[in-house]
Amino acid sequence: MAKNEAQPKPAAPFTWGDVQAILAAAGGNEGPGGLTGLTLPEFLALQLHGTPLIAPVSTTCCGNSDAKGRGARSSLIRGLRGLPPFDGKQFPRLPWGGSPVADEDIDRIETWIEEGCPGELVGSIALAGEVSVATEARVEVKGLPGPVFGPASDPAAWRYAKGELRQRMDVDVLGEPQKERLRHAFRELYKLNKWVGDKRSYNNLALIHQNHCQHGWERFLPWHRVYLYEFELALQDFCPDVTMPWWDFPAERYKPEDPANGAILPDAFKGFLTEASARFLRDHGFPAKIDTLIGQLWANPTQIYDAVSKACGKAYVEGENRKRLIDALLEANSLWYPLRYSGQFGKGTIDTVIHYHYPAKEDIDEILSLRTFRDFGGGSLYVDSFGFLDQNPHNTMHIWTGGMNPAFKTDAPADRNSAVRVAGRKFHQRDDLYSEPQFGDMFSNLTASYDPIFWPVHANIDRLWWRWQQDHPDGLPADLDSALTPWSYAVRDTLDMNRFGYEYVRGGCLMPVGLTNPVGRFVSAPIVVPKATKSFRSAEVRLHRVPQLPRSCFIRVFLNTPDADASTPLNVAGYAGYAAIFGHGECYGGPGHCEIPPAENRKFDLRERSMNTPRNHRIDVTRAARRLIAAGATSLTVSLVVIGASYEEDRELLRLDGVSLNFLD
């Protein structure tokens, strides 16, 4: 069987379209086992006899990354190379029914997998104007089509594979795939509850808060930063690219001035029915009208029972039917929790019954303006006191989300000293979840962490501390060396959240490029700016993993100016800023001297980071982004124009792994 000749290297970065071309040239079977005629999502999800075609990125049970070597582990690469089990003993070499692919092309596909499987270029534009060519290092541009780079199908996975900071996002801008991954990770922790001694189980992680939580003094914020980090790591053991989103309580959709008529909870944590869960209910005797409720969102049990009663009859929210309804809701959304009476305080709301204050933006601004850590986060043993952040919004949101069950029935007189029951309960077992307690679990610090909404509430508290730290870098707790039990972290270990591997953003978009070839000119596809994102404090364009460039240059950044080139004036509305890059110059060493080093050092290699390590560049584009959005823009494009030392466009210089637009808070 003759080998195909290697496909010529494209001038543009190697993407999904190039993979398709290589596989199409090799031919092969259609249908089961075929590698052609698929979309990128279909290709990435393809399995050959139960084995994933593209190896997933995951972590070991000890939390170690196995991202390195993903390409070599993939069945696609092993199959194209004829390695076991595709060596003819169990399966024939790939592509089945086609010609072997050239080794050079297999190497390029393997690199494509390592770089996060960049999608195909989603379009092209005409590049206007002409650029004169002073040396052979530049190319002449006369209306040539330029690539338009689309967003990553899974930006969190890309960042994880590249070892970059993970992003904790505003829960209200999460896409459905991100929500589903979060639900999947929670389900995996719930499954471990059957092993009482497994410290990774959800209940054991929640028990840490019950036994060790710190409130009312300076360890409140450091302790919960570690707790969030440890819980997030447990989620990432099962879904490595998951991060904990944060809940912006005073956002407009929650109507702080009238919270009972706002969204009450983030949609991701509300109850809903899917087609599968509705089918489950029909199989258990519910009428077909239950299907009319598919896709509706409910913030508390009262809303659920009212909707089901109206559609199917009151009998379907009582007795065994009520239990089956709870089963269906839990199966549909592992972030929903039946012992959560959000926005309810008996027969009214927290605002109407006791006139308690739901946190508003003005409250947050006042707290962020406090000068000392004692006032903001809490006092030491010597000036013992709650910090204002601990009181409101933290305590307020616990009471708001936990709530009081309006369906609670008792013949006893009202007891003002009653509290959430703890003793004797079997948390997250169905008998407990079917119960009708007086209070939601978020109502007490002994039970709060058993409710999944606990985590985005505390992620926002941690985010607000991070914001305050930016303006008060010298605002520190008094005792920095105290241990945060039950772990071995000291308070000082928590002061820089980036060392834990995350950052907070309101939203954004990442476009993979790949280091394979220079990028003549970068233009992104339009990036939609959600309403929740528009309250950003700053916006950044980031150039990811830029290696040492041989020549110095300026990289100009334009927003909503896809035809920008070297002649575009800098006073146009879309000009956002630039990065100046100091060139490396001609290599003076031997073979490998200037090559990009491995992403990770060898074990026991204690040398400093190589000067050739690719770096990230950040360009503040806040003014341009605000200017365009204020003028009515609902989406933004990012364009990069590389200007060489001679102030002419240099289209054979810039290499980078990706470009992102980030809305920060």
Image: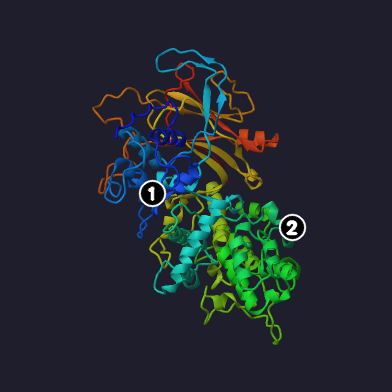
> Residue placed at 65% from the left, 53% from the top?
366
Mark sitting on residue 513: none
Quarter of the image for the N terminus: give it. top left
Q: In the structure shown, which secondary structural element does the residue marked by tag 1 occupy?
A: loop
Report x, y in % for residue 589: 25, 26
623 in relation to 46, above or below = above
Q: In the structure shown, which secondary structural element does the residue marked by tag 2 occupy?
A: loop
Give the amino acid type for the residue marked by disc 2 in the picture.
Answer: Glu
Return the disc, 1 or 2, that comes first in the chain's sequence. Answer: 1
Q: CA distance from mark 1 to mark 2?
A: 50 Å
- Image-quadrant location for residue 337: bottom right
> Residue placed at 68% from the left, 83% from the top?
415
> Residue placed at 44% from the left, 50% from the top?
501
Report x, y in % for residue 222: 48, 60
Residue 443 in sight here:
no
Residue 394 in sight here:
yes
Report x, y in % for residue 395: 61, 65
83 in relation to 596, above or below = below
Report x, y in % for residue 17: 46, 34
Q: Residue beneath label 1, please? A: 55
Residues 146 and 293: in front is 293
Whether label 1 touches label 2, CB < 8 Å: no
Residue 429 shown left or right of residue 405 in the figure: left
Residues 251 and 187: in front is 187
For disc 1, the neighbor class at 10 Å (few under 14, some 14 to 19, many from 20) is many
Residue 283 shown left or right of residue 48 in the figure: right
Q: Residue beneath label 2, please? A: 257
- State which mark lies toward you, 1 or 2: 1
> Residue placed at 73% from the left, 66% from the top?
351
Give the amino acid type for the residue marked by disc 1 in the picture.
Answer: Ala
